[in-house]
Image: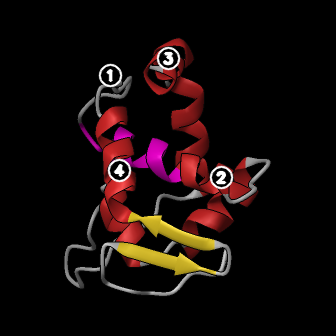
């Protein structure tokens, strides 16, 4: 996925535009999913992980390795809209890695996510 690093509400790529507001709405939707993890040691919010995985799937990822590659290529405005965490010292958004993507997608209640997305 080749995208510009624009800091406006719309990020463009070769295929069209992505409204960061829609990405934020998707992240808010995924915020309704309960996190199966214990609070201690959580670095990436569940809603952010589900949002960036969805973006990776829309970009053609077919497995967790490809999803991690696509997520790593997301520009900062999309990571911000998805709710990705900030680096504590440098302030840029950090994308979750392949293992985090896999663990959370496998741990989440798929029926709940399906109901939310279909609604």
* Distance from the alpha carbon under mark 4 to that under mark 1: 14 Å
Cβ atoms at labels 3 and 1 below 8 Å apart: yes
Cβ atoms at labels 3 and 2 below 8 Å apart: no
Count of number-bearing discs: 4
Label 2 element class: helix
- Identified at 54% across, 59% down, the residue is 97
Choose between 50 and 24: the one closer to the eye: 24
Q: Position of residue 82 (x, y in %)?
A: 36, 56
Say which mark, if any, is on residue 73: none
* Distance from the alpha carbon under mark 4 to that under mark 3: 17 Å
* Residue at image mark 4: 44
* Residue at image mark 3: 109
Label 1 element class: loop
Choose between 60 and 11: the one closer to the eye: 11
Q: Is residue 47 above or below residue 34?
A: below
Left or right side of 29 for 52: right
């Amino acid at each position: 996925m080749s995208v510009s690093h624009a800091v406006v509400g719309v990020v463009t790529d070769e295929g069209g535009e992505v409204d960061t507001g829609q990405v934020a709405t998707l992240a808010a939707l995924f915020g309704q999913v309960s996190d199966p993890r214990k609070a201690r040691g959580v670095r990436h919010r569940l809603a952010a992980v589900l949002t960036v995985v969805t973006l990776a799937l829309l970009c053609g990822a077919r497995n967790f390795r490809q999803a991690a590659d696509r997520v790593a290529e997301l520009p900062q405005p999309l990571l911000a809209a998805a709710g990705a965490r900030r680096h504590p010292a440098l302030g840029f958004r950090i994308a979750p890695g392949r293992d985090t993507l896999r663990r959370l997608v496998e741990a989440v209640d798929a029926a709940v996510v399906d109901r939310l997305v279909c609604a």
